[in-house]
Image (cartoon, rainbow, N blue to C red):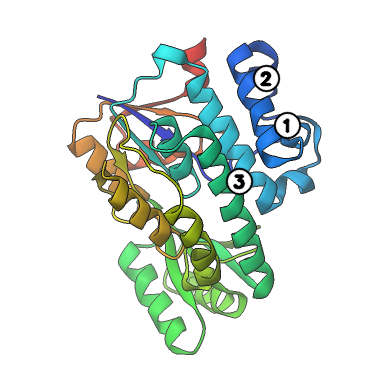
Amino acid sequence: MKAFVFPGQGAQFKGMGKDLYDNNPIAKEYFEKANEILGFRITDIMFEGSDEELKQTKVTQPAVFLHSVISALAMGKDFAPEMVAGHSLGEFSALTAAGALSFEDGLKLVYQRALAMQKACEAQQSTMAAILALSDEEVERICAEVSASGCTVVAANYNCPGQLVISGDKEGIEKACEAMKAAGAKRALPLAVSGAFHSPLMQPAKEELEAAIAATTINTPCCPVYQNVDGKPHTSPQEIKANLIAQLTSPVRWTASVQQMIADGATSFTECGPGAVLQGMIKKIAPSTGAENIELCHA
């Protein structure tokens, strides 16, 4: 069975999508439609903007969404997923590509999500850190210990065995990183992000986005969508909505999602969007399973 997966924030790069825009009329049409929906030419920032401009959450999220979704839609009939999943922001891309969200509604929700998250980031100094070569249980234990001292630190992204990202306030992340290293982590590396995504500190953004999601029409997708909150397949619009709302303050269970997709019959994974981050994770989760980039499918 063919599985298509969609990356999240952090996969962006300068010039992303320009080849698609220049060489595929369908892609160009969608990019121009996106400029109209957003009310500014995001394509100018994607193709020619500075790294700093592209790093802004309010730009990054819609940019990655657009590259991912348009890559899939530009394939035409060759895009025939039997299951889909997306990492964090990528879940919106997966839902849009699978027809659960219209292109316009998907982009509007992603932009609202980005603005709400940026606002939450500005309200409190917070960040994230990658923890390498420590068990999930040990990371969770240390997060609980540090949180008991009055800070906020949680496991946020279960990316693959031996790679977990934690999220919280700056003091909590600093304390947790020291404790992780002392417990034997190969690395405890603070990330260059401006907020504690997938943690309780995103509650204001969750509340803001909840109303927007509740008011958006979600259709039954063309195939099961494996959602971040529980790593399980969903096709019910009501379940999809509830999980999307919960996603902002809940961990991304990527390892569980990939394992469940394989258990349900996935034999190959195609990454739709910039970069190859998810391919690397999938190869660590299931070394014998094939993973490639959608660009290879265009060739």
| Amino acid bearing label 1 | Thr
Against 167, residue 222 (above or below) is above
Q: Amino acid at mark 2?
A: Tyr
Looking at marks 3 and 1 on the same chain, the residue that comes earlier in the sequence is marked by: 1
Which quadrant of the structure image shows residue 189?
bottom right
Please give the label number shown on residue 43. Answer: 1
Q: Residue at x 46, y 53 (%)?
A: 215
- Pointer 2 with pointer 1, Cβ within 8 A: yes
Residue farthest bottom in this picture: 149
Secondary structure of the residue carrying tag 2 is: helix
State the CA–CA distance, disc 2 to disc 3: 18 Å
Q: What's the distance in space between the residues labelled 3 and 1, CA to CA?
A: 13 Å
For the point 29% across and 52% down, which residue is it? 239
Mark 2 or mark 1: whose residue is earlier in sequence: 2
The reply to whether residue 294 is visible in this rendering is yes
SS at badge 1 = helix
For mark 3, what is the residue? 61
Residue tagged by mark 2? 21
* Circle 2 residues within 10 Å: few <14, some 14–19, many ≥20: many
Q: Position of residue 78 (x, y in %)?
A: 40, 13
Q: Position of residue 133 (x, y in %)?
A: 41, 57
Q: Are marks 3 and 1 in contact (CB under 8 Å)?
A: no
Can see residue 188? Answer: no
Residue depicted at 56% across the width and 64% down the height = 128
- Amino acid found under the numbered disc labelled 3: Gln
Mark 1: few/some/many CA within 10 Å (<14, 14-19, 20+) = many
10 Å crowding of disc 3: few (<14), some (14-19), many (20+): many
